[in-house]
Amino acid sequence: MKVGSLMELFFSVLLLIVATVSANIMYSFFPRIPLAFYQIGTGFILSWLPQFDHFQLEPEMFFVIILAPLMFNEGQNTSYWALRHNFKAIISLAIVLALVTIMVAGGLTSWLWPALPTTLAMGLAAIVTPTDAVAVSSITANVQVPEPVMETLENESLFNDASGIVALNLAVVAYSTGQFSVSGSIGRFLVVFVGGVIVGIILGSLLVLLQLFFQRQSFSVAAVTLPINVLSPFLVYLAAEELHLSGILAVVAAGIIHGIYHKQLRLTSTGNQVVLTTTWEILSQLLNGFVFVLLGVTLPRNMLDLADFSNSHFLVLLILAVGLYVVMTVMRFLWAQWDLVKVAAATAQEHRKNSWVIALSGVHGTITLAMAFTLPLIVGRKILPFRTDLIFIAEAIIVISLIVPTIILPQILPRQKNTYTIKQFNHLLTQMVDYAIQELKSHHNEDYLTLSQVINLLNTQRGHREYASAQKIMQLFQRTLSLEVAIVNDYARNNQVSWESAQRYELKQLFYLRKMVLKPWLRFRLNWEIVRRLLFNQRHLLWRAYRLKKTAPEESDNYQQDVYRMENWGYHAVIKYLRRMHQPNNKAEIRILRHYYEVRHQRLNRRDANTTSESELLIAAFQYEYSFVQQEAQKQKLSPDLVQALNEKISTDQFVYMTTDD
């Protein structure tokens, strides 16, 4: 490839990434509109730039670079027990319904469009069959989808992607050879499907064992474990494809194996957990957004090209796209309504409603567009006919499948809403703290001093749950963090603490801040900052930080002494800053920040207390609080939202109190 064309490709990809990030920013400000629409919109803007007049990605590269890591991440985030529990539903929806849909939709396409070869009609049906759980989650963010239904949809999307991809490959091969046999195609489908799963299980297990070996040898996560984890989908995919089996199914199976051993692959340190999960969050968000931006980039150009060729032909393709979507939606509804897949419901009316939810939630997204882009340009030394037409139909179906449920689902499902008042929350919160304190006094009164300290900490939970702006909290938190970093660096320059201690302390604060961030765009920025520091600036720290068990006691003691000094310097500076920033319009936000820093300061500076006993008492207290919430939920029939809010309060406080012991 020439240097000029390489630079042009690099610049185009850079613009696509910028568009993806811009969509995330807009979604952070206006989350009522699904993220996919922002991504398509930013892609639409890009489509008018000269760089994207004839933009193409090599189909093979698209599979390897985008599909493989996305499917691997979906696999490793899938619960093995949920898969076992929903095994019959997965087989029914992801394999049987997928194959039936491909045959029906392919036959309909061939009948309505006689000029299109039957094999390509089947290929088009294979492209538009897979559903996308990420797109479903985006569309249903503001409505309450029944949990069993959502779980079924997520598991379905994991495997019907693979069904569609295998079927598409068979259709392209049949077109290139001119031979198509139903029995032969089904046999080849099973070989490719099962063979891909077996290869994925074997290679996934070997890669897990390799990572566990390096983990036990205390190798750096950034230098060894993370690269192996990130490279796993590419290695598995290429190996399976080399054996002429399904690379995507192999990647999914390998991802599930990684998910099974997920807890073992997470090393004991907080930093190690953060760097692995953060890296995959960044990759998956970027690649998913990348595909929808590409949809926005290519759709307008395809529409113009088809309109220039013939307005009537463009209209026919659009009608065909609508027809295929209606047929697939009706088939999904009948499949659920006729109990060909088990739908959780207490009444016949609820069964019908959930059947429509399953039907309308067959949203097409990343995989469908990716498969459309992977249609080869040339087959058997000839240009693949109707390639632009097929891509346009797939893109139109994606857009339709996003718009229809966005409009209809809110009409048949309840909206997400809080079903409790602030007064109710505060009343139960006070009762919860009282209950935990009483239980501690009754069962843990041997060490009065430690018990008193724990009770004082628990009493800080009694707050009035007033409105606080998450955006203001994060802005203040970023400023106080920057203030701490500046002060610590000043002391490090004056040799009052070591540079290594200062950098490790700053990194720990980033970990804490990341756990408190809720906004997607802020999380994305912070995730990238953590990975950047870990991978590029502080690799030498990782080697030391993740080998604390082998660190000499003197070094560990020195670091702890430095932490006490740095925390005290930072605490006094932050409290002074918060007093200065206190205004009537930010009282709630200032109070939350002060609470966090005061608790952290108190925890770090009780050097003479029995911290082990205190931690045990705190853990017991939080368990009592969880028990109280569970008991009250059963007695008073509390709303799920109120129970969730109380449990979130407990878990958040538990994090604040316990993380400073890391």
Image (cartoon, rainbow, N blue to C red):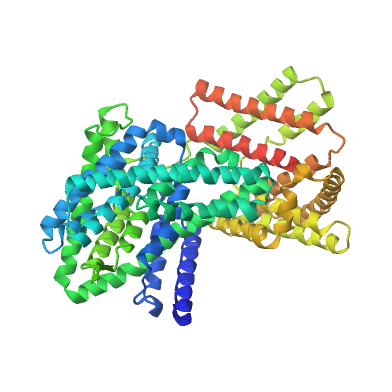
Q: Residue at x 64, y 27 (%)?
A: 623
Toward which corner of the image does residue 34 lie, by quadrant?
A: bottom left
Q: Position of residue 288 (x, y in %)?
A: 43, 57
Q: Position of residue 59 (x, y in %)?
A: 35, 64
The reply, left or right, for residue 495 in relation to residue 207 is right
On screen, residue 625 above or below 531: above
In which quadrant will I find the N terminus?
bottom left
The reply, left or right, for residue 364 in relation to residue 431 is left
Q: Nearer the viewer, residue 388 or 140?
A: 388
Q: Position of residue 158 (x, y in %)?
A: 38, 45
The reply, left or right, for residue 109 in relation to residue 305 is left
Q: Residue at x 23, y 38 (%)?
A: 335
In which quadrant will I find the C terminus?
top right
Res 255 visible: no
Q: How many marks?
A: 0
Q: Position of residue 388 (x, y in %)?
A: 25, 68
Q: Residue at x 50, y 42 (%)?
A: 205
Q: Residue at x 20, y 47 (%)?
A: 184
Specify the farthest residue to the top. 442
Res 413 visible: yes
